[in-house]
């Protein structure tokens, strides 16, 4: 039997293994270095390409910049662009001063007790618009200068309301404000003495046809949509009458009927064009099955003159005896009324002020307010005992102010 004898020492074997490992590592370093060089070359190529592209576009950008800066109306264009970007903000903050006429027609009493304004200031700045005015109150009861007229006027502020909202079609789509006609040519509201307020939807105007309004929710043709409405003619235009005052007897049904106007006892209205109020809601109460519902109108949120106390709603800064232009005895006073800011906001559409009775004032506000203004009453002349000693019926310490 033969035997093998290892004549290589152990340390010589370890050295051989170490040399093999060194050569393998050296080989790997060469491979990694080559790969790195390749990657560096690729990155360099990309960077050079990018720089070349930047340099190529730089001249074009410079040329376009010169051309843009040479545009003579650039400042105006940038200003208009900025304003268009802020148009929603501007619109939401826009206020409508002309609503003061309608507000005055509701605030100022027009009956046996009269209040005549001699000077008026409307301040719409800030969050609390105010009406500040000098006026005279007259109870038409000679020789009384009746503070009761002023007291009644102050207390009526608590019951003043307003209403606004949108006119909608049968499907509940909002009809743009510019499509609606709410006033006669004399400025008075369209009103039926038996059925209440209404407005006309002018379907001939651009963007106002029933198909245009329903375009987002309906695939019906123009003819089909128009056939669903009762069309009238007003001032040479095709119009659809929309009631602002609910037609309770015509719309109420115990159960809905397909394609028929419907109003439930909680005030929900459907299948008929109507006014969607943001302030008022209606509740019907049925005493028994055979009786017609009794309807209640509720408007708790939209107070024309907010405030918990009388002095928060109206401040009487002075009052004194005086004589009117016809030499009648009157009560002179100065006051400031703080109004709900929502009543002047442009985005609150179809705004109308409500008198304390809860009824709309449908007369021509622009004509009616003429009778609210008059010549300022004069102070009592020295020695005028009739004026100085006139009975101040209903006076109290708070009302008399500067008397």
Image: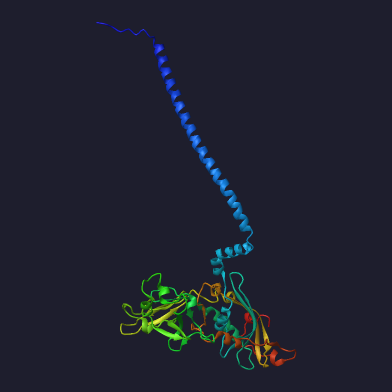
Identity of the residue furthest to the top in this view: 1
Instruction: Pick the residue in front: 52 or 69.
Output: 52
In this rendering, the answer to whether 172 lies above or below 32 is below
Q: Position of residue 42 (x, y in %)?
A: 49, 37
Left or right placement of residue 382 versus residue 279 in this view: right
Q: Quick check: can you spot residue 304?
A: yes
For residue 264, say whether it is visible: no
Closest to the observer, 280 or 71: 71
The residue that appears at 60% across and 84% down in the rendered structure is 150
Q: How has the structure been colored for display?
A: rainbow
At 61% across and 73% down in the image, what residue appears?
124
Given residues 16 and 60, the one toward you in this image is 60
Q: Which residue occupies the foreground of this view, 65 or 110?
A: 65
Q: Quadrant of the N terminus?
A: top left
Q: State which quarter of the image contains the C terminus.
A: bottom right
Q: Position of residue 342 (x, y in %)?
A: 54, 73
Q: Quadrant of residue 117?
A: bottom right
Residue at point 55% right, 67% down?
A: 87
Residue 159 versus residue 46 in the image, above or below: below
Number of numbered discs:
0
In the image, farthest residue toward the right? 382
Does residue 69 lie above or below 18 as drawn?
Answer: below
**Residue 379, position in %: x, y?**
71, 87
**x and y, in percent, of residue 274 in the image:** 42, 78
């Amino acid at each position: 039997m033969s035997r093998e004898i290892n004549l290589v020492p152990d340390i010589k074997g370890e050295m051989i293994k170490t040399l093999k490992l060194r050569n393998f590592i050296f080989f790997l370093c060469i491979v990694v270095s080559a790969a790195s060089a390749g990657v560096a070359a690729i990155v360099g190529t990309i960077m050079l390409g990018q720089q070349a592209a930047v340099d190529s576009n730089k001249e074009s950008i410079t040329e376009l910049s010169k051309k843009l800066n040479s545009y003579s109306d650039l400042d105006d264009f940038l200003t208009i662009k900025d304003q268009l970007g802020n148009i929603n903000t501007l619109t939401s903050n826009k206020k409508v001063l002309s609503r003061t006429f309608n507000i005055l027609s509701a605030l100022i009493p027009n009956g046996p007790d009269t209040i005549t304004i001699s000077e008026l200031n409307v301040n719409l700045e800030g969050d609390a618009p105010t009406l500040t005015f000098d006026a005279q109150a007259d109870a038409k009861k000679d020789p009384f200068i009746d503070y009761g007229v002023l007291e009644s006027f102050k207390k009526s502020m608590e019951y003043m309301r307003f209403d606004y909202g949108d006119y909608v079609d049968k499907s509940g789509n909002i009809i743009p404000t510019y499509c609606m006609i709410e006033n006669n040519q004399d400025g008075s509201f369209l009103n039926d003495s038996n059925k209440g307020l209404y407005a006309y939807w002018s379907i001939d105007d651009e963007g106002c046809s029933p198909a245009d309004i329903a375009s987002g929710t309906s695939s019906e043709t123009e003819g089909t949509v128009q056939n669903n409405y009762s069309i009238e003619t007003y001032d040479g235009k095709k119009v659809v009458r929309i009631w602002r005052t609910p037609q309770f007897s015509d719309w109420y049904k115990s159960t809905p009927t397909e394609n028929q106007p419907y109003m439930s006892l909680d005030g929900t209205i459907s299948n008929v064009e109507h006014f969607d109020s943001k302030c008022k809601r209606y509740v019907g109460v049925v005493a028994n099955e055979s009786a017609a519902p009794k309807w209640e109108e509720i408007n708790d949120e939209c107070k024309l003159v907010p405030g918990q106390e009388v002095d928060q709603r109206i401040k009487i800064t002075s009052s004194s005896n005086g004589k009117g232009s016809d030499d009648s005895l009157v009560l002179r006073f100065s006051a400031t009324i703080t109004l709900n800011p929502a009543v002047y906001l442009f985005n609150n559409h179809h705004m109308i002020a409500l008198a304390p009775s809860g009824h709309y004032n449908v007369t021509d506000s622009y004509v009616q307010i003429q009778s609210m203004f008059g010549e300022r009453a004069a102070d009592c002349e020295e020695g005028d005992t009739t004026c100085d000693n006139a009975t101040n019926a209903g006076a109290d310490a708070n009302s008399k102010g500067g008397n």
